Image (tube, rainbow, N blue to C red):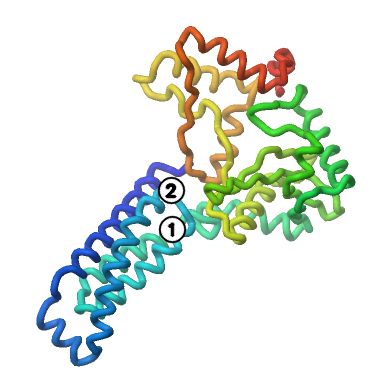
Amino acid sequence: MQTKSNRIQLWIVALLTALVGFINLLSAATPGWPERVESLKQIFPFEVRAGSHIFAAVTGFILLTLAINLVRRKRIALLLTIGLLIISIVSNLLKGLDYEESLLSAIVLVLLLAMRDTLQGKAGKNLRTAINRFTKLGHQVIFYPPPLADELLQELRSVSDEWLATRQGSEKQFSLGWFDEAYLRSYEIAAVKTPEGQISAFANIIPEYQLNEITIDLMRKRAAVERGTMDFLFVSMFQYFKDIGYDSFNLGLSALSGTGKTQDSPRLEKALNYLYEHLDRFYNFQGLHEYKDKFQPRWEPRYLIYPSLAALPDVVVALIRADSGDRLLDYFKPGA
């Protein structure tokens, strides 16, 4: 989750970007200061000055449309905004020596470059350290394209079986992916290989085509792995899919997190918050949320819609049955 400070900064930059867009449109539609225009006539021909007016107007319009996508942290929106702000600085100077507009564009550009929340930033220092340490030790992350070979699936099965043995329960079959060879064979796998060539952890990759987003469904690790192995796997996936052009990486749900936290929350939500805080022995809600939170994702709300309060118990039982594969007792085993 982004910190409150980061969210505020992001909204400020987005609003300033929209403001630059509006001012560019307004400035392009109004005549410049006569003395400034006369000075430019001595340096640049009419075609350059007229073209700069057009560039300022087009840049302003596009910046207005990009502002909301900055809030959504779209990588392509960030790159386009950076480029358009540079064009805005130049075009405003060339069309009428409008240094005020250029200065505002430059300020927004600096803010945008300074506040990126990426692995190159301060927040990713510990994660970069994990990658460097694992790389020096000889670990590597390998991406296996589908269809997967039988030998690879057998090794993944052994990793999964070790992980399941530590959980003291059966696999979930609704909220998370489960090990199914026919299913896994058709998806890309990211796997951590030890210096000895053994797979110590893996995750299968699922693309979200409409959002140019990537996510995972099933992740497993061996019972005994080097500390930080999963961090190494995740950060390597983040970097890999960023480099090949994906806009975002979806870490999945964090069930019940943030529910019933305020004093005016409904009683039902407060009851769910109690379960969130006290049922870790059955399902590691808080631990899973804290692990995902270390990567500073942008959390978005998700809702459960049910017909009435009286129907809610039936809905909950149905969800548990779906998640447990109709093995209710296994679902409530400690560590399941």
Residue denoted by label 1 = 77
1 and 2 marks in contact (CB < 8 Å): yes
Q: Is residue 235 above or below residue 39?
A: above
> What residue type is disc 2 on?
Arg
- Rendered image quadrant of residue 56: bottom left
CA–CA distance between discs 1 and 2?
A: 9 Å
10 Å neighbourhood of mark 1: few (<14), some, or many (≥20)? Answer: many
Name the residue nearer the viewer: 53 or 280. Answer: 53
Which residue is at 72% across, 16% downward? Answer: 326
Which residue is at 73% across, 59% downward? Answer: 135
User: In the visual, does 178 lie left or right of 1?
Assistant: right
Residue denoted by label 2 = 72
User: In the visual, does 161 lie left or right of 104?
Assistant: right
> What residue type is disc 1 on?
Ala
- Rendered image quadrant of residue 203: top right
* Residue 241 in the image, given as x and y percentages of width and height: 62, 55
- Rendered image quadrant of residue 168: top right
Which mark is first along the chain, 2 or 1?
A: 2
Name the residue nearer the viewer: 127 or 305. Answer: 305
Image quarter where the C terminus lies is top right
Name the secondary structure under disc 2: loop
Q: Is residue 45 above or below residue 56?
A: below
Name the residue nearer the viewer: 302 or 28. Answer: 28
* Residue 86 in the image, given as x and y percentages of width and height: 36, 71
* Residue 220 in the image, given as x and y percentages of width and height: 74, 38
10 Å neighbourhood of mark 2: few (<14), some, or many (≥20)? Answer: some
